[in-house]
Amino acid sequence: MKSLYNLFVRLMIFGMKVFALVNSKTKKGIRGRKQSVEIVKNAFAPEDKVLWMHASSLGEYEQGLPVLEKLKEQFTDHKVLITFFSPSGYENVKKKKHMADAICYLPFDKKKDVQDFVSSFDCQIFFTVKYDYWYNLLNALKNRGTKLYVISALFYEHQIFFENYGKWFAKQLKNNIDWFFHQTIKSSALAKNIGLVNSSVSGDTRFDRVKQFLDRENHLDFIDDFKGSQKLIVFGSSWQTEEDIAQLLVKKLPETKFAIAPHDLHRVSHLLKLFPNAILYSSLSNSPTFQTSNYQILIIDSIGKLSKLYSYADLAVVGGGFHSAGLHNILEAAVYSVPVIFGNQYQKNPEADDLVTAKGGKHFDDFVTAAAFIEEVMKKDLSAEEGEISYLKEMSKNAGDFVKSQPNSTGIILRKILLQNEN
């Protein structure tokens, strides 16, 4: 099976190189990996003690960051390495201020490349986030005496580990991983069915991260003037279908303001065609004398504004749930007691199911039904008598209460890791 795995890795690399010919993001990942070993050798000496977090992409990075920050507080003499598999994580984080001594792509999981990489430093603690497992990497680290963890682990039916041909891989996880910190009880039960008993349920660390938003300054220039006393619907990380919802609602809710932050800034030109009377956020920055209150639609054409923008929202429509790419982060809105609307492609997002159960969010199969629901709840809220608790206000309270009720996952994880790494 080991030979078959290594063959799979080589075929995967070949496939990605072919795809890179027509996909710029994949090309960045291929090129970036050529520099990974050089980056860590420049950042670390072989004897340097290192805390290493691996995240497949940006979402996993955000889940792992609270744990990494707390570990660094405890292991002050350790340096920090962050690796990514996908360009969407690496390209975003490398541009921002971060706590890492080195940040790079994870090398492809070829035995020689992995050995060269991990021998460049002394990794004391390694953790991967959610479900990004690579056999040669895990095996190489275990052989060097590293403690290995999985945080916010998520197992679900039909993963390779639950098929006959995947039992070998499940055994490798059992042999190499010191502890699994599961997001859900269901994930823990599934893992135990395949022998992964070294585990506990700690919840989702993203709740810890978004709760911190409530203690920071969330002001955004121009948004108070843009919103005024009117209701605001924020479309966060929007794809085409979420933008179709906005298009249906703009004329039906003339007294409501709309802010649209696309998942990819390349969509801004499309949005300007869809909403020719909209204004760009960058235009406000460049011309602060603009009368923003005269505009109904604001297009966010810069990165890093969305999580603060949600604090102004009365309702959020979060993108990805109508697309195979999957649902984007709904907790960044819900933490501000903002009800969230999304599509039904959220099978890998248990927090979405929980938010619906808590009646702080709703999912829909199509954009027409979603738009009709939003129109109804917004109009009923606007027409509610003074002191009357509308359905929108009920959803708002439920969303905030849902986030606040979640455990301190980072603390649970940290206590266990510290216990296992006492000198």
Image (cartoon, rainbow, N blue to C red):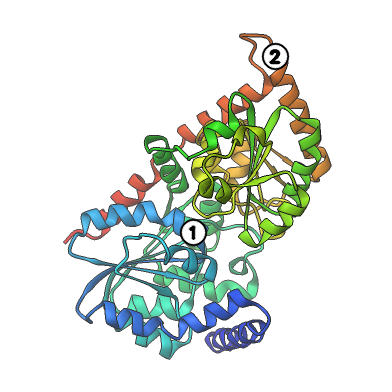
Disc 1 residue type?
A: Glu
Q: Is residue 214 left or right of residue 358?
A: left
Q: Secondary structure at mark 1?
A: helix
In the picture, which quadrant includes the N terminus?
A: bottom right
**Residue 190 appears in which quarter of the rendering?**
bottom right
Q: Nearer the viewer, residue 396 or 417?
A: 396
Q: Amino acid at mark 2?
A: Ala
| Residue ID for mark 1 | 60
- Please give the name of the residue rendered at 46% of the width and 47% of the height, measured from the top-left corner: 206
Q: How many marks?
A: 2
Q: Which residue corresponds to the image point at 34% horizontal and 80% vertical from the top-left?
A: 39
Q: Is residue 205 left or right of residue 329?
A: left
Name the residue furthest right: 368
Residue 346 vertical position relative to residue 378 in the rendered view, above or below: below
Image point 64% across, 69% down: which residue?
163
User: How would you rate the neighbour count of disc 2 (Cα within 10 Å): few for under 14, some for 14-19, many for 20 or more?
Assistant: few
Asked if disc 1 and disc 2 are in contact, CB closer than 8 Å, the reply is no
Q: Callout 1 environment at 10 Å: few (<14), some (14 to 19), or many (20+)?
A: many
Residue under label 2: 384
Image location of residue 158, percent across then percent down: 66, 63
Quarter of the rendering occupied by the C terminus: bottom left
Q: 235 or 60, which is in the foreground?
A: 235
Q: What x and y, as percent, mark residue 419?
A: 25, 54
Q: Picture coordinates of residue 352 (x, y %)?
A: 61, 43
Give the answer, above or below, for where 160 lies relative to 355. Answer: below
Image quadrant assignment for residue 399:
top right
Q: Is residue 9 above or below residue 304?
A: below
| Residue 27 pos. (x, y %) | 58, 80
